[in-house]
Every structure is written in C-alpha cells, then in structure tokens.
Amino acid sequence: MTTTSTTSTTSSLEPDSARQGYDRDRAVRVAVLGVGMMGQDHARRLATLTAGAELVAVSDVDVARTDAVAKEFGVRAIHDPKAAIADPEVDALVIATPGFTHEELVLLALEAGKPVLCEKPLTTSAETSRRIVEKEAELGRRLVQVGFMRRFDTGYQQLRALIESGEYGAPLFLHCAHRNATTPPNFSSEQLMLDSVVHEVDVVRYLTGEEIVAIRVIAPRSTTQAPEGLLDPQFVIMETESGVLVDVEIFVNTTFGYEVRTELVAEKGQARIGLPEGMVTQSGAGWGGSIPKDFKERFGVAYDVEFQRWIDAVRAGTNVDGPGVWDGYAAAAVCAAGVESLKTGQRIEIDLGAKP
Ligand code: ISE
C-alpha cells in the first residue's frame, strides 16, 4: 500500500547514513521470499494495508505458487530468490521461506545492503545465527529485524510494562501454555522447539530483559491425535540469569483451537495474558467463550503493527524497530539447546558468548 503512514515510530536508532541515496519520499519496494501460508499473508498485508510500502515481487521454490500469488497481487514473479535480493528495483525483503534457508538469504541481503524482515526463527542453529550477528556487526549497520510479532501484541506489552514498573516486585515464575489445533504436514519433534517454543523463548527475554541460561525438555506421553512419531506435547523448563523459572506446555495437536497464555507470578502479585478473547459467558447452561482458530487470527493486529513499524523504520533509514539479530541468535541458541535436551534428557546450559 503506497499512501503515507501516520503511525509514529518510537525507534531511537540512528539513521543509516550508508543509504543516504535512498529516496525516502517514495514507497519502499518490497519483495516477499517464500509465499506459503505466512508469506501470502504478509504479501496481502504489504499490498493492502502497510502505508509507505509497495509489494513489487514474490518468490518461491514452488513456481506455480509463485506465479499464482504474483498474479493475484499484480506483481512480478521472480523464481530465484537470490535474483530477487539482487534486483535493483527491490529496496527491502521479507523472508518467509522455511527456517533452514534463512542463513543464506539473510547473508545475501546483508551483502546487498538491503533491509530485511526475517520470519522466525532467524536460523535453525546457534552457529548460523551467530554468523549473521557477526556479518551485521562487520557492516556496522543494522539491517535485519526478526519476526517475533508477539512483541507488538498489547497483552505482552502490558505485562512487560507491569514487570518493569516494579509494582509487583521481582518476577519468580512464568507459566506459559502454547497450543495449536494441528500441525502442518511433516512437522517434526524438533520443530516444536524451533518453530513454536522459539516464540516463548523470545517472550521470556522480552518480558524479563534477561538471557536464558539453562533449558530442559521433557516429553510426556504423546497424544494419539498427533501424527505417528511426533512427540507432542512437550514440557520445557527454562532458567533466566537472575533465576526466574519458566515452564512451557507446548501442545500442537489439541484439535480445536489456538491458545497462547502467559501467567506471571511475582513477589507481590500475579498477572495473566492470553485468556480466551471476546465474550466469555457463564450461566445455568454452562460456561463458554471463543478461542481463535490460528495464529493469523490471534496475532493479526500484532503482525499489522510489526509491518507498519518496520516500513516506517526503513523509510526513516533506521531499518529496524523491534527485535534484531542478537534476539534471533539468542533464541536460536536456546532452542538448539532445547533440541539437545529433548534427545539426551539432560539440563543444558547456554553460553551466548560476547555481544559484538
Ligand atoms: C508457527 O510457525 C508460528 O509461528 C506460530 O506463532 C506458532 O504458534 C506455531 O506453533 C508455529 O508452528
């Protein structure tokens, strides 16, 4: 969408002087790489909703899908994602391809000097994410934002503000539940960590302002509703630097809806977010509310805000207004340790090393 934005950004980053030639009066021309479910949703968002953005191209390994989505939005289909990154008529990129492709694409975008909004996970291992952190530091310019959209959700923002205010004293526990109705085909036991728990990892860092130093994953009996071989549910225990204890129930084949909840237990009070939205009824006939069907519905507004603030930051020359590469790296390192714990049954400690 190419009208001028009225959303103000709260970014305090310095404008990127290396992009001084960029014409800030025109819309940011964006290509979306990967147009599966999430990429298509983002393409629609950019084409119809995000002020100051112009969707100019889409790219996907599935040629027929690329062509169909390009036709739907009246934009170019570029079958090779590397060509889309290099294209002189593309200013910025949204990467929504599978996680294992992210390292190569993000590094190419960094070399091309183009701002990127990369869907989570930044990459699927600590080493590959660390390479991105180092590459960006070498360039001396922030270019990569990571798609942890929950940071743009009002509930999480309120809970963080409450913790920061100190009113309830120090946080002691965070109890998290993350439930999906079903999983996409071929979802593996590791993906519960890498694709789903990764959000909880980021939320814990966002809410507490602390790094996670240890993780343990336990697999109880699996639901018969999960595909054969998938360890679902799993129970994750994390410890932060100051000793806040976090537990996450991750259960991705509940069969009926999408629920993401966090309960804070602090020294002088408790708070909960993510309870069923909409009207909750209680009468002689029983109790009832409504549960969103998936994350596109539950976090729709958060995605909209995330995209608007990212485009505003690109136009302002600051490129990032939200979680960056260090956040993506920290989350990838914790999740990789979680996968190791799932395999070994051990508590795994995490050492992120120095921040460049
Ligand atoms: C999916 O990729 C997401 O990012 C959702 O937010 C998460 O709830 C889901 O479990 C993931 O598969």
Image (tube, helix red, strand yellow):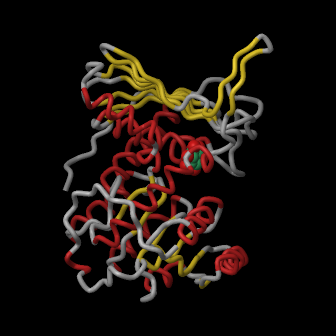
Question: Which residue shows up at 54% across the image and 63% down it?
Answer: 96
Residue 208's place in the image compared with 191, above or below, is above
Residue 262's place in the image compared with 33, above or below, is above
Question: On the picture, is 286 further left or further right than 347?
Answer: right
Residue 113's place in the image compared with 249, above or below, is below
Tag count: 0
Q: Nearer the viewer, residue 27 or 224?
A: 27
- Can residue 345 be seen here? The reply is no
Q: Residue furthest right?
A: 285
Q: Position of residue 254 (x, y in %)?
A: 70, 33
Tell me where residue 43 sits by quadrant. bottom right
Quadrant where the C terminus sits is bottom left
Question: Which residue shows up at 30% across the image and 83% down it?
Answer: 22
Question: Which residue shows up at 47% across the image and 64% down it?
Answer: 102
Q: Position of residue 315 (x, y in %)?
A: 34, 73
Q: Nearer the viewer, residue 266 or 221?
A: 266
Q: Nearer the viewer, residue 136 or 103?
A: 136
Tell me where residue 139 sits by quadrant. bottom left
Question: On the picture, is 7 further left or further right than 274?
Answer: left
Q: Position of residue 251 (x, y in %)?
A: 62, 33
Q: Residue furthest bottom?
A: 88
Residue 11's place in the image compared with 236, above or below, is below
Q: Nearer the viewer, residue 194 or 170?
A: 170
- Can residue 68 be seen here? The reply is yes
Q: Position of residue 127 (x, y in %)?
A: 36, 55
Q: Residue furthest top?
A: 284
Tell me where residue 141 sits by quadrant. bottom left
